[in-house]
C-alpha cells in the first residue's frame, strides 16, 4: 500500500513508522540530487509557510528558508515578540489564526507540549525544528548522512559520546529504534538517558535495533561506523558549564578515542554548532589532515537538520574548501567533485571513469605507464582541472607520488 505523508505534522519521529521515516530520507536524497542537477520543480508554489523561532538559530533557519525558496513557497518569519504564546493570546487562538492564513508552520521553541498544542489547533502541518525534548529534523539529516557515508542505515553501528539526556540523543535513540541502528550512548552515569524512555523505545524497536548505555569506551566504540557528539551545554543551560566540564572531561572525542573503533573508515558526526566555552571534542580529532569533510548544508536543506561528517583515512591531499581532493593511489588519480562530472567524462578525451561515492561523483583518471612519472602525472591532473575551471575547483598541490 502506498505511503502518504500529506498533511502530517512532524513533531517527533515516534509518531512515524520505519517505512514512513525511510520515505522521508529517500525523498530528501531525491530532492538533494535534483537540486544538484539544477532541477527545481516548485512543488510548493503558491504555498505560505510561517517560521516561528522562539530559540535562536542560524543553520536550521537558513536551511528552511532555502528549501522553501527552492520549492517555490513563501516563507514568513514571525518574531517571538509578535507571537508571545500565552501572553498576547492563547496558544489555541494563535494556532487557529495561523492555520487559516498559512499552509504550514515551522516551530522552534521550548516545551514539547507547546508544539503539540500548536499542531492540535492549527489544522495544518507543523514541523518541529527543535524543542527541549526532541529534534526530529536533525536526526533525519543524520540518517541521510549515514546512508550517504556508510551505505546503509539498518545495522549501522553508531556511538554517541557526551550528555546522554539532551534532545539530540533522545531523537537519535528514537531514530535508531525505528530504523534498526545499533546505537551506543557513551556517557557518565549522572548523564545517562531516562531508563523509562529507553525501555519504551525497546518496545517500539524494529529488527536489528540496539540501544546500549555505557560508561566503557571500549564497549561503546568497538567496530563503530560513526562517532557522534554535541556540545556539553545546551541552550538555556549556560549556568551548568563548570558542572558539565567536570562530568564530561573524560568524554571528549579525541584521536585516541576514535582509534578504539579499530577501523580506519569511521566517520565523525557533529550536529553543530561545535564551538563552545567547553569543547566536547579535540580540534585535531575533527580537523586532522587525513579527514574528508562533507559539506554540511546539503542534507539540512532537504531535512531541516545538519550533520558535519568527517572521515578517517584519506590518502594524499586534503579537501580544499570542501570541493576538490586529488588522491594519487598506485597509478590512479581520483578527482572528487559534485558537479558536471558526468558531462566532463563524456566530452573529455582522457580516460575517466565516473563512480558515485558519499562525496559525490569520483572521476578516476587512469594514468598509463608511459606518463606515470610525477611531472607528467601532475600535468595530466592540471589539464583536467583546467577543464573543470567553471566549477571554481582548485588543487591542493600536495601531490606526493607512490609507485
Image: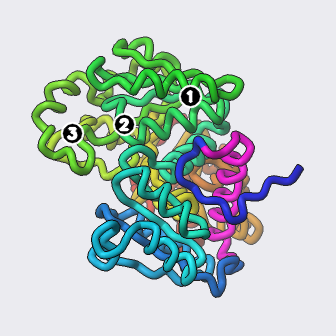
The label on residue 201 is 1
* Residue under the image location 33 percent in, 63 percent down: 57
Q: Is residue 285 magenta?
A: no
Q: Position of residue 48 (x, y in %)?
A: 56, 82
Check disc 1: other Cα within 10 Å, few if <14, some if 14-19, many if 20+: many
Q: Circle 2 sits on which residue? A: 229
Image colouring:
rainbow
Q: Is residue 21 magenta?
A: yes
Q: CA distance from mark 1 to mark 2?
A: 21 Å
Mark 1 vs mark 2: give the one in front. 1
Is 175 left or right of 4, judged from the image as shown? Answer: left
Magenta stretch: give its range. 15-39
Q: CA distance from mark 3 to mark 2?
A: 11 Å
Residues marked 1 and 2 touching at CB (< 8 Å): no
Q: Position of residue 66 (x, y in %)?
A: 50, 74
Mark 1 secondary-structure assignment? helix
Is 110 left or right of 240, judged from the image as shown? Answer: right
Q: Circle 3 sits on which residue? A: 279
* Residue under the image location 51 percent in, 49 percent down: 136
Considering the whole magenta stretch, tell me its main secondary structure: helix
Q: Earlier in the sequence, mark 3 or mark 2?
A: 2
The quarter of the picture where residue 27 lies is bottom right
Amino acid at each position: 500500500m502506498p505511503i502518504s505523508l500529506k498533511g502530517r505534522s512532524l513533531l517527533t519521529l515516534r509518531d512515524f513508522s520505519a517505512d514512513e521515516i525511510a520515505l522521508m530520507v529517500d525523498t530528501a536524497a531525491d530532492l538533494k540530487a535534483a537540486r544538484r542537477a539544477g532541477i527545481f520543480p516548485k512543488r510548493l508554489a503558491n504555498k505560505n509557510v510561517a517560521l516561528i523561532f522562539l530559540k535562536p538559530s542560524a543553520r536550521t533557519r537558513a536551511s528552511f528558508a532555502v528549501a522553501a525558496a527552492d520549492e517555490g513557497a513563501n516563507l514568513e518569519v514571525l518574531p517571538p515578540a509578535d507571537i508571545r504564546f500565552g501572553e498576547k493570546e492563547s496558544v489555541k487562538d494563535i494556532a487557529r489564526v495561523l492555520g487559516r492564513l498559512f499552509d504550514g508552520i515551522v516551530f522552534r521553541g521550548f516545551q514539547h507540549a507547546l508544539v503539540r498544542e500548536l499542531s492540535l489547533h492549527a489544522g495544518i502541518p507543523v514541523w518541529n525544528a527543535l524543542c527541549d525534548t526532541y529534534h526530529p529534523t536533525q536526526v533525519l539529516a543524520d540518517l541521510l548522512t549515514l546512508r550517504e557515508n556508510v551505505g546503509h542505515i539498518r545495522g549501522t553501528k553508531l556511538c554517541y559520546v557526551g550528555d546522554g539526556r539532551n534532545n539530540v540523543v533522545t531523537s537519535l535513540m528514537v531514530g535508531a529504534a525505528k530504523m534498526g541502528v545499533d546505537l551506543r550512548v557513551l556517557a557518565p552515569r549522572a548523564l545517562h538517558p531516562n531508563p523509562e524512555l529507553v525501555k519504551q523505545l525497546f518496545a517500539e524497536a524494529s529488527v536489528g535495533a540496539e540501544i546500549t548505555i555505557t560508561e566503557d569506551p571500549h564497549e561503546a566504540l568497538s567496530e563503530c561506523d560513526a562517532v557522534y557528539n554535541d556540545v556539553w551545554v545546551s541552550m538555556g543551560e549556560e549556568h551548568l558549564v563548570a558542572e558539565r566540564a567536570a562530568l564530561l572531561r573524560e568524554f571528549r572525542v579525541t584521536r585516541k578515542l576514535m582509534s578504539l573503533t579499530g577501523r580506519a573508515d569511521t566517520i565523525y558526526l557533529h550536529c553543530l554548532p561545535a564551538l563552545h566555552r567547553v569543547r566536547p571534542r579535540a580540534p585535531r580529532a575533527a580537523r586532522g589532515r587525513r579527514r574528508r569533510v562533507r559539506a554540511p548544508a546539503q542534507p539540512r536543506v532537504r531535512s531541516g537538520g545538519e550533520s558535519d561528517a568527517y572521515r578517517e583515512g584519506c590518502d594524499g591531499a586534503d579537501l580544499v574548501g570542501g570541493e576538490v581532493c586529488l588522491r594519487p593511489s598506485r597509478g590512479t588519480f581520483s578527482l572528487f567533485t559534485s558537479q558536471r562530472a558526468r558531462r566532463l567524462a563524456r566530452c573529455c578525451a582522457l580516460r575517466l571513469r565516473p563512480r558515485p561515492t558519499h562525496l559525490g561523483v569520483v572521476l578516476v583518471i587512469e594514468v598509463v605507464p608511459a606518463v606515470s612519472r610525477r611531472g607528467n602525472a601532475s600535468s595530466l591532473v592540471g589539464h583536467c582541472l583546467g577543464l573543470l575551471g567553471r566549477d571554481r575547483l582548485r588543487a591542493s598541490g600536495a601531490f606526493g607520488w607512490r609507485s
